[in-house]
Image (cartoon, rainbow, N blue to C red):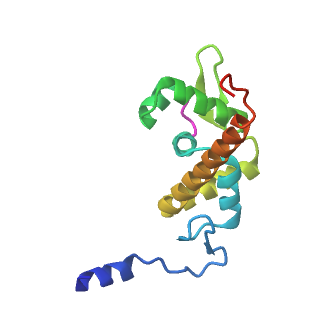
């Protein structure tokens, strides 16, 4: 190891802040300053990074009415994907569709508690992007593994002509 590598490793090592919510992520083994309520919200309510990015985009300009195409362009996703994300956000009570004939979505949390949670999430994401994205990705990886195990189990009962 070169002399400067040890110093770099020391600089990059996260140190616990003076915060009681500082916790070690059991999923990743990486230290993360994620408050428990935000971590819980991420695990239970945020399905993907594009979902989170769509939420934060609309939150960043709450008075703006966003057409599906504009959201798609800003997130670098297809119109279909943007429509699906916005439908999920609407079902979750995060946004409202102001014009059903020509869908335009606006940030409008269904409750003050949800608005506060989304504000907290935005603050945490701004300062702990890596930890948040890692948590969301690790959740998706676990879901994929469970889906594969379930499919393998189901395949064991499949009737085959050659059997």
The spot of residue 67 in percent (x, y) is 52, 25
Q: Is residue 64 magenta?
A: yes
The spot of residue 55 in percent (x, y) is 58, 42
The spot of residue 2 in percent (x, y) is 23, 82
The spot of residue 108 in percent (x, y) is 67, 38
Identify the residue at horizontal 58%, vertical 58% (top origin). 135
* Front residue (pair 64, 76): 76
Residue at the extreme bottom:
3
- The rendered magenta stretch, by its main secondary structure, is classed as loop
Quarter of the figure with residue 138: bottom right
Q: Is residue 30 visible?
A: yes
Q: Is residue 134 above or below residue 155?
A: below
- The segment highlighted magenta reads 62-66
Q: Is residue 76 left or right of residue 32?
A: left
* Front residue (pair 56, 60): 56
Q: Is residue 66 visible?
A: no
Quarter of the figure with residue 26: bottom right
Figure quadrant of the N terminus:
bottom left
Identify the residue at horizontal 72%, vertical 41% (top origin). 153
Identify the residue at horizontal 64%, vertical 47% (top origin). 143
Figure quadrant of the C terminus:
top right
Residue at the extreme front:
163
Identify the residue at horizontal 67%, vertical 47% (top origin). 146
Residue at the extreme top:
101
Q: Is residue 135 left or right of residue 72?
A: right
The image shows a total of numbered marks equal to 0
Q: Is residue 74 magenta?
A: no
């Amino acid at each position: 190891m070169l002399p400067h590598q040890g110093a770099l490793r020391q600089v990059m090592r996260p140190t616990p802040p003076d915060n009681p919510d500082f916790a070690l992520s059991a999923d990743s083994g990486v230290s993360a300053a994620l408050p428990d309520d935000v971590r819980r919200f991420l695990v239970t309510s945020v399905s993907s990074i594009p979902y989170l990015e769509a939420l934060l985009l609309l939150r960043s300009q709450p008075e703006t009415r966003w057409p599906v195409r504009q959201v798609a362009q800003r997130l670098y996703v297809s119109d279909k994907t943007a429509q699906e994300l916005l439908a999920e956000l609407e079902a979750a009570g995060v946004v409202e569709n102001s014009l059903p004939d020509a869908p335009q979505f606006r940030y409008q949390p269904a409750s003050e508690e949800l608005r506060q949670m989304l504000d907290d999430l935005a603050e945490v994401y701004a300062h702990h992007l890596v930890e948040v994205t890692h948590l969301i990705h690790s959740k998706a990886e676990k879901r994929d593994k469970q889906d594969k195990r379930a499919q393998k189990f189901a395949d064991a009962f499949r009737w085959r002509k050659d059997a």
